[in-house]
Image (spheres, rainbow, N blue to C red):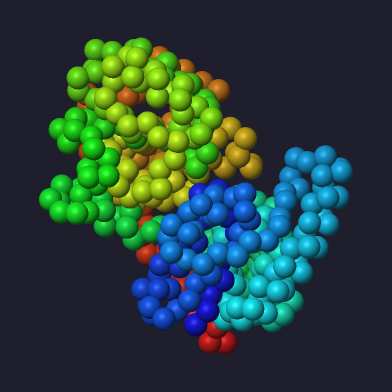
Amino acid sequence: MKIIIAGGGTGGHLYPGIATAEEFKRREQKNSVFFVGTEHGIEAKVIPREGYPIRFLKAEGLVGKSLFKKIKAFFVFLISIIESYRILKSIRPDIVIGVGGYASVGMVFTAYLKGVPTMILEQNSVPGLSNKILGKFSDAVAVTYQESTSFFPKDRCYLTGNPIRKQITSMNADKDADKDTDPYLLFPLEKEKFTIFVFGGSSGAKSINKSMVEALNYLLDLRQNIQFLHQTGQGDYEKVKDVYRRLGFNGIVVPFIYQMAEAYAVSDIVICRAGATTLSEITAVGKPAILIPYPHAAANHQELNARKLEDMGAARMILDRELSGEGLAEAVRELYADEKARKEMRNAASAFGRTDAAEKIVDIALSLIKK
């Protein structure tokens, strides 16, 4: 069986696609999974490391662009149709699955025109423009949240949850294992220290980076007791790393982390945005979290996601416009000092987490192929 998974641009779109690919391979090792994306998206770096073949096509966005750039994007879309046709002719897939992002539009639409079964995954409560368009003619739509179903045809919409990679949950279970998969071999932190994992998405988040380095000044008395794993993005890497070093905090500062399973496994709490894929992962592994929703997300869906977890007691939320170094330090200090609160958050997060989404999605895909 041959499967094309199209889309990406960000980790929030790409990693559910990888989780779906893993499930196809788990069902039958002979299944061939091909990814299609753009050369400037995160998929260009991540997919080769994951061992899957990837094809590239041209794609540009429309949202928030000038009239000239929208016209240009339309012509780029026409080019992507031609490129998608060539890829389909070369691979001859049994199904095409779009995971969101501009690179999914041309490929899924062309597959539809050619009569190839199509499916899209929607990670957020409010779909982006790409999936709103593709949902009109895809054979199936797999959504993460009940709220998403109103945007798609009800007879083709399935509530599956957001697929996460198996390694995320398996690595967390093996946190203290004394073997080659020990996450501390990859991240050489001190096992007995309280570890705070900070990240702002695949390209970092300036407001989180800025507030975190300011927060360090309010946490100086805890230097001997806490440590950090901080993904900064490329732009803030040197500056953030210098502050940790200058203030004498133990930790690891990197521009990008490919091994998220190990990163979650070594952490006691997480400070991050509230994208759907991130929330699916931290709830699946039951990590207490301080969520700082991205303020410009479509229909403010990140704040809605974060508020839902906060209401359940699974996380704490700080709005980006209210974020400060002092306030973030206080939130860290409270969770560090209150083991009971952390345990309650872990339990609430685990109750919310879903680990069977990939299986459900592949079941639906296989039923479409059989038809």
Q: At 64% from the left edge and 42% from the top edge, which residue is drawn?
A: 298
Q: At 35% from the left edge and 20% from the top edge, which residue is drawn?
A: 244
Residue 352 at x, y percent in the picture:
36, 50
Q: Is residue 175 visible?
A: yes
Horizontal relation, residue 215 to residue 187: left or right: right
The relative height of residue 220 versus residue 169 in the rendered view (above or below) is above
Residue 97 at x, y percent in the picture:
57, 68
Residue 227 at x, y percent in the picture:
26, 27
Horizontal relation, residue 214 to residue 94: left or right: left
The relative height of residue 49 versus residue 329 in the rendered view (above or below) is below
Q: At 12% from the left edge and 50% from the top edge, which residue is drawn?
A: 178
Residue 351 at x, y percent in the picture:
31, 51
In the figure, residue 337 lies in which quadrant? top left
Q: At 57% from the left edge and 81% from the top edge, which residue is drawn?
A: 94
The relative height of residue 111 versus residue 13 in the rendered view (above or below) is below
Q: Is residue 347 visible?
A: no
In the depicted view, which residue is nearer to us: 175 or 72? 72
Horizontal relation, residue 101 to residue 29: left or right: right
